[in-house]
Image (cartoon, rainbow, N blue to C red):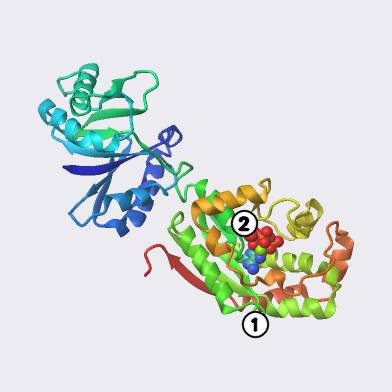
Amino acid sequence: MKEVLLCKYGELILKGANRSYFEGLLMKELKARVRRAGDFDIHRAQSTIYIEPLNDDCDLDLALEYAKKVFGIVTINRACVVEKNIEAIYQAAKEYLPQFMKGVRTFKADARRADKRFPMKSPELAGEIGAAVLEAMPNLKVDLYDPDIVVRVEIREQGAYIHAGQFKGAGGMPLGSSGKGLLLLSGGIDSPVSGFMMAKRGVTLEALHFESFPYTSERAKEKVLELARILCEYSTRIKVHVISLTHIQEELRDHCDEDYFTLLLRRYMMTLAERVARRNKCGAIITGESLAQVASQTMRAIAVTDSVVNMPVYRPCIGLDKEEIIDIARRIGTFETSILPYEDCCTVFTPRHPRTRPEPEKVIAEENKLDFKALCDEAFETLNTYDIRIDED
Ligand code: ATP
Ligand code: MG
């Protein structure tokens, strides 16, 4: 029996002139992700994207797992396709549906007729499906109001599609529909989660990581590239830019008040981030900051770092507790990598008494002890880019 996946997107996307643009973005993402599960024909018709295996080597279970991570898709049906005649439909419902109905006690049968030329009306057709299910599983009860599962036949252009229940898609907006953002990616728990959250709203990700070799190791960088690889499950291809802060940090250590290290460093980071973002046509910077989590994330401290940037900074974790962020990190698969114990540049020369309520004038005075622009220019020269893709081996 031929099986396919039917991906359905939300009302949001269906509306307005952007519809075919959104659909195009969805198709592009699906193709890039599902390709790893075999040769599939992916096409759209009647507000549905069809994923159809082209040969026996296709792994439909895997394709389903990949499709579940494509933002913009709301539900996915795994269905069998048969000819549009009632005998074939009845037979298929009887044979195909029971495997999805283990442990189910009540069901409702439903029919949708996108192809109105089909001679039988929907209620009648639903009755046939219901009868087929009951013939295969006589102990089931029909419950029209609160069923454990809904079984359905959809009469479409290319055939009759029969399925039981549905899988929840990733929701959100199609990747790319909200432009591109530069994610400041550390090796920690919060920044990958922030990247995921913005990708969910349609932002294609590019990333920037700061290292501080030899104070931070090659393994720390590898860990960040691995996090980017995991994020590629949601944002197919991520360019990761790496900039060395070693010299800036040494200069700060040698010339500035220790209590201000972190804040000063963060102003360098944000300035460099804006430069990378503009070069690469990113419309916003994304960070993993969460209010009051550490000294550099108080309202005052964030104001001081923010004031060097002239582009929007998205901080989707700002109102989340650590526990909530960890829950998301586990769900998206970054947590185990994030907790590997490698050093981050922010933990190099950490002040013993970081300022939580910095005076902007004092920050500026400390900053002016160094040639800010020259150090930024020099750091920018160290930029290296890694092209991380979902299908690289
Ligand atoms: P995370 O868990 O994301 O590392 P954190 O709670 O450790 O966050 P900080 O170290 O203060 O917080 O960093 C705040 C944010 O600054 C991070 O979420 C990240 O977006 C950015 N950041 C910190 N260190 C780096 C780095 N080495 N490279 C790139 N961005 C960084
Ligand atoms: Mg960190």
Q: Residue at x 26, y 24 (%)?
A: 139
Which corner quadrant of the figure contains ligand 1?
bottom right
192 left or right, relative to 95: right
Number of marks in the rendered image: 2
* Residue 143 sits in quarter: top left
| Dot placed on the residue nearer the N-terminal end, 1 or 2 | 2
Is label 1's Cβ within 8 Å of ligand 1? no
Q: Which residue is mark 1?
A: 214
Residue 316 in view: no
Q: Residue at x 47, y 43 (%)?
A: 173
Q: Residue at x 24, y 56 (%)?
A: 39
226 or 287: nearer the viewer: 226
* Residue 146 sits in quarter: top left
**Residue 175 % position (x, y):** 46, 50
193 left or right, relative to 92: right
304 left or right, relative to 362: left
Instruction: State the mark number for residue 190.
Output: 2
For residue 327, above or below residue 211: above
Residue 76 in view: yes
Q: Residues within 10 Å of mark 2 (few under 14, many from 20)?
A: many
Is label 2's Cβ within 8 Å of ligand 1? yes
**Residue 212 % position (x, y):** 66, 77
The single residue placed furthest to the front in the displayed view is 139
**What element does badge 2 sit on?**
helix
Q: Residue at x 33, y 26 (%)?
A: 105
Q: Identity of the amino acid at label 1?
A: Pro
**What element does badge 1 sit on?**
loop
For residue 10, above or below residue 323: above
Instruction: State the mark number for residue 193.
Output: none
**CA–CA distance in space, label 1 to label 2:** 24 Å
